[in-house]
Image (cartoon, rainbow, N blue to C red):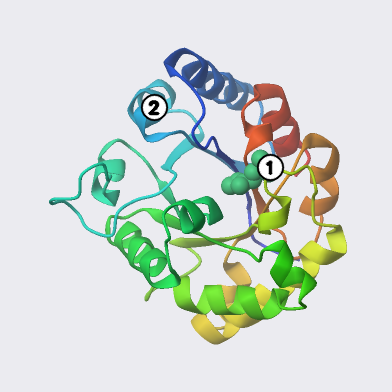
C-alpha cells in the first residue's frame, strides 16, 4: 500500500484576470471547507494573481504556488520573480521546468535545477516537470529522455518532503490526447526507479510523481488509480471549479 497522499495541482498558465481568478480560487477553497477529497489541492495562478489569490484563500485547505521562479533571491533580473517573493506571499510550491518554459524561454536542465534548488532554499516545494516530445516518443527515446531530464533537473538535497516530480508528455499538453494508462504507468515507474538511484529507495518510495497532459474529469480516475501516479498537474481542466473538483474527487 502506498502512503503517498495525492496532489491535485492546477496550473492556470497565462489565464485569468482578477475577477475570474479570484472566483475560481475561492470556489475551490469553499468546496474544501465542507468536503475533504482524498488529496491535497494546489492552484498556481499567473504571477499577477498570486498575491490576491493567496490572500483570498489564506487559512483554507487550498495551497497556492508559482508557475516558475528565478534561481536568485533578488537582484537585477527585470521581469523575474524570486522564490523568496513567492514564499513571502504565502506560496507553498513553485513549478519549475514546465515544457512551455523550456520551449518559450530556452530553459535547460541546468537552469531548471538551479531554479528548483532556489525554490528549496526559500522553503518552497519544487514541482520539477519533465516529459518527452512526440518525436522523441516516436523515436523510442521516451524513457531515456525522461531519465536524462530527471538527472539534469533534480536539485541537490531533493527529498519527498521538498520535491514533487511532474511527468508531462509534451504531446499530451493541451491537445486532448492523453497518455494511455499503460503509457503513463510505464514512465512513472521508470521515473521512480531512477529516483531510487538519485535519492535512495526510501525517499523515492515517498516522492510524489504527478501526471500532466489533458487530464480531465472523464479520464482522471483511471490515471489516478495507477500505482505510480500520485496526482495530476492540470491545465485546461483546472480553469473550471466543477472540472477541477471532479478530478480531485476521483482520487
Ligand atoms: P492541459 O491539462 O491543458 O493539457 O495542461 C497540462 C499542463 O501543462 C499542466 O502543467
Horizontal side, residue 149 vs residue 205: left or right: left
Horizontal side, residue 213 vs residue 181: left or right: left
What is the x, y in percent for residue 187? Answer: 73, 70
The verdict on label 2 being within 8 Å of ligand 1 is no
Residue 8 seen from this side: no
Q: Is residue 198 above or below residue 146?
A: below
Horizontal side, residue 249 vs residue 115: left or right: right
Residue that protrudes farthest toward the top in the picture: 19
Q: Secondary structure at mark 1?
A: loop
For image coordinates 59% across by 68% down, the residue present is 206
**Disc 2 vs disc 1: which is toward the camera?**
1
Within 10 Å of disc 2 (Cα), the crowding (few <14, some 14-19, many 20+) is some
Quadrant, the N terminus: bottom right
Q: Is residue 137 above or below residue 194?
A: above
For image coordinates 60% across by 61% down, the residue present is 208
Which quarter of the figure has residue 145? bottom right
Q: Which mark is residue 49?
A: 2
Residue closest to the eye, 240 or 204:
240
Disc 2 to disc 1: CB gap under 8 Å: no
The verdict on label 1 being within 8 Å of ligand 1 is yes
Q: Give the residue number, with chain letter if any, for mark 1.
A: 174
Nearest to N terminus: mark 2 or mark 1? 2
Quadrant, the C terminus: top right
Q: Is residue 141 above or below residue 67?
A: below
Q: Secondary structure at mark 2?
A: helix
Q: CA distance from mark 2 to mark 1?
A: 22 Å
Within 10 Å of disc 1 (Cα), the crowding (few <14, some 14-19, many 20+) is some
For image coordinates 41% across by 25% down, the residue present is 53
Amino acid at each position: 500500500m502506498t502512503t503517498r497522499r495525492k496532489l491535485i495541482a492546477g496550473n492556470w498558465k497565462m489565464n485569468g484576470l482578477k475577477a475570474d481568478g479570484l472566483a475560481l480560487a475561492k470556489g475551490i477553497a469553499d468546496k474544501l471547507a465542507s468536503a475533504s477529497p482524498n488529496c491535497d489541492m494546489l492552484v498556481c495562478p499567473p504571477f499577477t494573481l498570486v498575491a490576491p489569490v493567496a490572500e483570498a484563500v489564506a487559512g483554507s485547505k487550498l495551497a497556492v504556488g508559482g508557475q516558475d521562479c528565478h534561481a536568485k533571491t533578488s537582484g537585477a533580473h527585470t521581469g523575474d520573480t524570486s522564490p523568496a517573493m513567492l514564499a513571502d506571499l504565502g506560496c507553498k510550491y513553485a513549478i519549475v521546468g514546465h515544457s512551455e518554459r523550456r520551449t518559450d524561454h530556452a530553459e535547460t536542465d541546468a537552469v531548471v535545477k538551479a531554479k528548483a534548488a532556489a525554490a528549496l532554499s526559500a522553503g518552497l516545494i519544487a514541482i520539477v516537470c519533465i516529459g518527452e516530445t512526440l518525436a522523441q516518443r516516436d523515436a523510442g527515446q521516451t524513457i531515456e529522455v525522461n531519465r536524462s531530464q530527471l538527472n539534469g533537473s533534480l536539485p541537490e538535497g531533493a527529498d519527498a518532503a521538498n520535491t514533487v516530480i511532474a511527468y508531462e508528455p509534451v504531446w499530451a499538453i493541451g491537445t486532448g490526447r492523453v497518455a494511455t494508462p499503460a503509457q503513463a504507468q510505464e514512465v512513472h515507474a521508470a521515473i521512480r526507479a531512477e529516483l531510487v538511484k538519485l535519492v535512495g529507495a526510501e525517499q523515492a518510495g515517498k516522492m510524489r510523481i504527478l501526471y500532466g497532459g489533458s487530464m480531465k474529469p472523464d479520464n482522471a480516475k483511471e490515471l489516478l488509480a495507477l500505482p505510480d501516479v500520485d496526482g495530476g498537474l492540470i491545465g485546461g481542466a483546472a480553469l473550471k471549479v466543477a472540472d477541477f473538483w471532479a478530478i480531485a474527487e476521483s482520487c
